[in-house]
Amino acid sequence: MSQSALPRRRSFADLVARLPLPKVTIWRALAAAVIGVGLVSMIRRFALGLGATTNLTDQYPWGLWVGVKLCGVAFAGGGFAITAAIYLFGVERLRPIARPAVLVAGLGYSCFIASLIMDLGKPYNVWHPMVLWNHHSVMFEVAWCVMLYTTVLSLEFSPVVFERLGWSRAYHTAKKFTIPLVLAGLMLSMMHQSSLGSMYLIVPNRLHPLWYSSGLPIFFFVSSIAAGLSMLTFAFFLAHRILGRRLRRDILQSLAKASVVVLGVYFVMKVFDLLYRGQLGAIVASGIEGPLFLGEMLLGVLFPMILFARSAVRNSKNGLYYTSILVILGMVLNRMNVGVTGFEKSSGVHYFPSFEELSIAAMVVTVGFVVFGLAAKHLPIFPEDYRRNSRLEHH
Amino acid sequence: MSYGILFDSVRCRQCGGCVDACKVKWDLPDRDPDKLSENTFTTLEIHDGHPVRRMCMHCENPACVSVCPVRALEKTPEGPVIYHADRCMGCRYCVIACPFSIPKYEWSSAVPRVRKCVMCHDRVSRGKKPACTLFCPYGGIQSGPREEMLAEAKRRLAEEPDKYHQHVYGEREAGGTGVLVIGAVPPERLGLPVNVGDDPLPEKTWAALSRLPGVVGVAGAFSLAFWWVVRRRDQVRAEEAAAFAEREEKARARVTRREKQEVNS
Ligand code: SF4
Ligand code: SF4
């Protein structure tokens, strides 16, 4: 009897047995699998080169990864829109989503940069635009804006990290630069969101007439706001369902209302553009482009706009959730059409991404979501996480 | 002075000497003799019996040069459009931007380069002729200052109007190209792209890009002004609220004093 009362000596095996095990859920297993497969593909891509691992050719030099780049930046649109609304235009009500907006934007850009590295033939030269300037090149301008804006986003996000670390001085110093950072972020975003569209102005004979337009820069800029707001709504739902963060329905409803305006402006511009260029008929012309265009414009823009305009939808949790997913899908389709499928007709060949292209793209996106989950869990991103922190006062 | 090449589809006898000369000059493998690729910078295509050279057109205002973010492609003052592999980062924007579908990529390489005709810039810059124009015995292909080539092309069109379709391809296409093509049939029947337009493609981009700083500057100034107004409004409100609170405080103090006096009296 007295024997068992003695404290047992802990063996190494005990320690190992005590290691906390992450809970295995179906989503985690899936994410791990996608990332694992993606890593293998990534190794293959860098070891064997682009030709052996992608379906890219001289006829189809840009493929899925370019599409992912466009999507990543588009879905970052909430970052500049929300911060500008709060800090420059005085929409105080949105303050609780400032941090999630900056986080989502940062992850969008990370996806852009990751896909870019995969896609470049010589990724180790990625820094060359810093020293070899060609200010006539849209891609040069995009490169600079992405570099600068990623820096701006990191600085905007730094108070979150300082707060977590309890570095009060650094926190307050960083906070002082909010306004200039937000202003710089707005201007940089205007420049390169539109410039991603301008990138396609040089291919009037290649990009399908349903998408080629001198309005591309404006379309890309406006739609990035809608894309950003919906991705932000989606991110809120993720944090709510996985981490139990409070769903700020009041704010999500405001975002939905704003989306109605943005989607409406976008839709009208696109229709007028088609009329002006006399390309309305191209929708019914043979080929897959017509249905794709209709899909993105009707299911991804018009339909969600009508839904968001109804208060019954805005007042319903599911309504907000599914409608924002519609917008997200519509925007993905749009960027893929401009970046990938819109070239099919003129190229004369058929392109479908290879297994490596698909699995690497899936990995990039999955890592984005995983990092979002980790950051949301461990950093004071959502209001209830930073309210708890009494040491630093908040604005 | 910009250097040019003139190809005459009527005089060409389809011997292919120019294609071979290019392969020898650039030490290219024998693969893909009939299509432009990383191994072949120029081809001789036959359309309905009419020969035509395909090669980089060495545009006067080249799309490929304008899009390259790292100045890996360069329009030299001598005319040839050349490529610096050490600068290139492999974005392939040039491949997609060229209206003539010229630049090709070394897809199978681990350190891929863009490959295309550079009009033997090493020779041209030393006052020599490009390799492909050295030996043509029939006058099908020849080179010299672009203006001279253009004048020569027009002279041939005028001298034998029934033999030539009256158009110098490249005089205005895509803003003008260093390579000029004349032949018996219209360019589309020679397989040359005719949808490139007469304006240089880079202008389309520049129209948007050059406006950007102005638009963004105005938007930035507007936002800043808005911020200032909002802040000012909040400040004024805060001041008014403070002033109001102060007045209240004073009034209450007065009341209290009076009450005290009344009590004391
Ligand atoms: S033909 Fe194409 S590759 Fe050659 S200079 Fe013109 S744009 Fe550049
Ligand atoms: S592939 Fe190279 S040469 Fe072509 S645009 Fe990109 S960096 Fe310039």
Image (cartoon, rainbow, N blue to C red):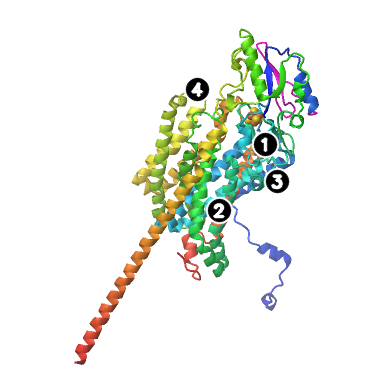
Instruction: Give the answer, above or below, for where B237 lies relative to A187.
Output: below
The magenta stretch spans which residues?
B26-51
Question: Dots 2 and 1: beta carbons under 8 Å?
Answer: no
Measured in 3D between alpha carbons, the distance from the residue under mark 4 to the one under mark 3, in whole angstroms, is: 43 Å
- On the image, numbered disc 3 is attached to which residue? A124
Ligand 1: quadrant of the figure: top right
Element type at mark 2: helix
Q: Which of marks 2 and 3 is in front?
A: 3
- Is A248 in the magenta? no
Determine the residue positioned at 48% across, 45% down: B214
Q: Mark 1 lies on which chain?
A: B
List x then y, in percent, for residue B152: 66, 17
Q: Mark 2 lies on which chain?
A: A
Classify mark 2: residues with Cα within 10 Å, few (<14), some (14-19) or many (20+).
Answer: some
- Kindly tell me whether residue A321 is visible in this rendering: yes
Which disc, if any, is residue A286? 4
Determine the residue positioned at 59% across, 56% down: A23
- Is B28 in the magenta? yes
Determine the residue positioned at 45% across, 45% down: A324
Horizontal side, residue B48 vs residue A204: left or right: right
- On the image, numbered disc 1 is attached to which residue? B73
Q: Which of marks 2 and 3 is nearer the N terminus?
A: 3
